[in-house]
Amino acid sequence: MSRSATIALTVALLAAACGSDSQDSGEPAARGSSATAAAAPPPGGDEQGQAADGQAGDPVTALSDHVAATCATDDPVEAPQIEPSPREDVPSALRDRTDPAFPDPLVDPDEIVSGGPPPDGIPAIDDPKFVRQCSVDWLAAGEPVLVLDMAGDVRAYPLQVMTWHELVNDIVGSVPVTVSYCPLCNSAVAYDRRVGNRVLDFGTSGSLYNSALVMYDRQTESLWSHFTAGAVVGVLTGTELDRFPLQTVSFADYRAARPDGLVLSRDTGFDRDYGRNPYTNYDNPESRPLLFRGEYDRVLAAKTRVLTVERGGEAVAIVQEALVDQRVLEFDIGGETLVALAKPGTASALDTRSIVDGRDIGATGVFVPEADGQRLTITADGDTFRDVETGSMWNILGRATDGPLRGSQLQPVEHLDTFWFAWSAFQPETTILLAEPAATS
């Protein structure tokens, strides 16, 4: 495919994700707006700092009554939110990446390229609504959802929604978080959006770096790499956000594991064709990544799906197909022993036009193999997992469902399911642990 054709296809794909209510103004949208508009400082005040520290209101407690209710109603559960910090009077990297007031950028600003849409052309969800998972009838069993568990406050973010919005500014377990999903690099990351005394909220910049989403914060309009959780251009350059473990699993697995969990509603305030994949056939392993200018190790095809972990300065990648076939892989990294689990039953969100028809790519998770102070050896057992030491059964979310350890939770480890080209570009010194499916006898 020629470069011009590639760019045209990219613009078409991303324009489809923008939907009909974006305007090509080149200006960031106001928080909570369903159309692109000039950014306006959100209301702030001393109260927001208290809420950010968990001292004013407790979202977990506030939601408990809703979660405990039966599914006699499918009324939305409006999760408590806090106001982000106000817009600051500082130069904007969204408008000028070369302002001399900025620290030295961490990437070449010329390598941050337009993806087609203007800032907020793909609109973030700023006031998310949730429903009880037992009332959801618009998600098929195999559809992929992102699962975030913060102090027992458990949320699922369906990729049929995330594909069209890419960012959700939320508060989970009393912590302000941003949940992100980048279709072009096929990765999902959850961040703590507190920086010092600030509570940031994020929007899509309309630009890409190494074919990965570039976010901007609405407080300073610095540019951030979705992939590294770091500010790369602007007044906050060098700042890194803490990340939280986030898993992509099937809705059926989430429903079985967390009957008390919530699901991000399709009531977003935007008109989108939720359930349709605007990036049809994009995850063909042999196809080229779009608007990618970086270098990657050609040992694997560009869009090979890999589970990746970085700990203690070391990076590893495991081919997802091979892991789903083998089911369990214990490995050492950064002086720690971890275990990667995988099981079939989760559809690709980037395959067929309808997500529900996407091919089965499976689900993964990474954990510290210990519970109740005991070192465990995890093995596959049918559609689930079993530890050798106690015989307890475990699910893909790392929770014991039966046996002596029933109710115990393995400590989840922050990892990334992504395309090889993206991981290799950002982490060139990566060891591949498992590249081929297990041989059959």
Image (cartoon, rainbow, N blue to C red):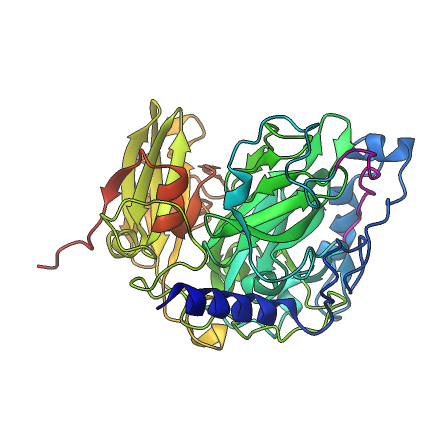
Can residue 53 be seen in this snapshot? no
Q: Is residue 71 above or below residue 224?
A: below
User: From which residue to which does the magenta span run?
Assistant: 79-91
The percent coordinates of residue 229 (x first, y second) are 56, 38
The percent coordinates of residue 179 (x first, y second) are 61, 48
The percent coordinates of residue 356 (x first, y second) are 48, 74
Nearer to us in this view, 6 or 184: 6
Residue at image point 37% right, 70% down: 359
In magenta stretch: residue 110: no
Residue at image point 25% right, 41% down: 432
Res 185 quadrant in image = bottom left
Nearer to us in this view, 6 or 331: 6
Placement of the N terminus among the 4 image quadrants: bottom left
The percent coordinates of residue 407 (x first, y second) are 50, 43
Nearer to us in this view, 142 or 392: 142
Residue at image point 36% right, 50% down: 421
Can residue 44 be seen in this snapshot? yes
